[in-house]
Amino acid sequence: MFNKKPAQDLRPQSGGNSMAATFSILGTDVSVKGDLTATADLHIDGSVEGDITCAALVQGEKSTITGAIRAQSARLSGTVHGSIEAGELVILTSARIHGDVSYDALTIEQGAQVDGKFAHRVPTGEEPALTLVS
């Protein structure tokens, strides 16, 4: 009775060093108006009207995003109305992109539709070589 240790509290602690969620999901029934920022991965099946900034983005087929996307990696299969800037970008067959695309690595499946300009990003710290012509 007196020798028992108190039960440990196993609930997540709020504060600085607690483990953060590894991903967040917006379901098909969720509609967001406003910018989204996530330090972890983000999976969107609903609709977003605003800019998105995250580590990794996965977009579902029925999803619609109206706004700019900035991510280290993005896998898009829905509709996007806005610019995309991603390190590693995968555009799947069902994707419909209306906007300019900037990327480090790019994969586009056959059947995907993109209405915009593509631009390969120059890695930070590297500048294109310039040659003087006389």
Image (cartoon, grey):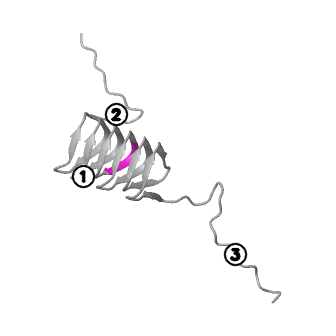
User: Which residue occupies 33% across, 35% down?
Assistant: 121
Q: Is residue 77 left or right of residue 34?
A: left
Read off the residue under disc 3.
Answer: 8
Q: CA distance from mark 1 to mark 3?
A: 47 Å
Which badge, 1 or 3, is on the more N-terminal residue?
3
Q: Position of residue 62 (x, y in %)?
A: 30, 55
Q: Is residue 71 magenta?
A: yes
Queried whether the magenta region covers residue 35, the answer comes back as no
Q: Which residue is mark 1?
A: 92
Q: Is residue 23 above or below residue 80?
A: below
Q: Nearer the viewer, mark 1 or mark 3?
A: 1
Contact between marks 1 and 2 (CB within 8 A): the answer is: no
* Front residue (pair 49, 43): 49
The residue tagged with tag 1: helix, strand or loop?
loop
Identify the residue at the far top of this view. 134
* Amino acid found under the numbered disc labelled 2: Val
The quarter of the rendered structure image containing the N terminus is bottom right
Magenta-highlighted residues: 70-75
CB of mark 1 within 8 Å of CB of mark 3? Answer: no
Q: Position of residue 37 (x, y in %)?
A: 49, 46
Please tell me which residue is depicted at 24% across the width and 48% down the height of the picture.
107
Residue that appears at 23% across and 52% down: 94
Pinpoint residue 128: horizontal percent, then vertical percent. 32, 27
Q: Quadrant of the C terminus?
A: top left
- The residue beneath circle 2 is 122
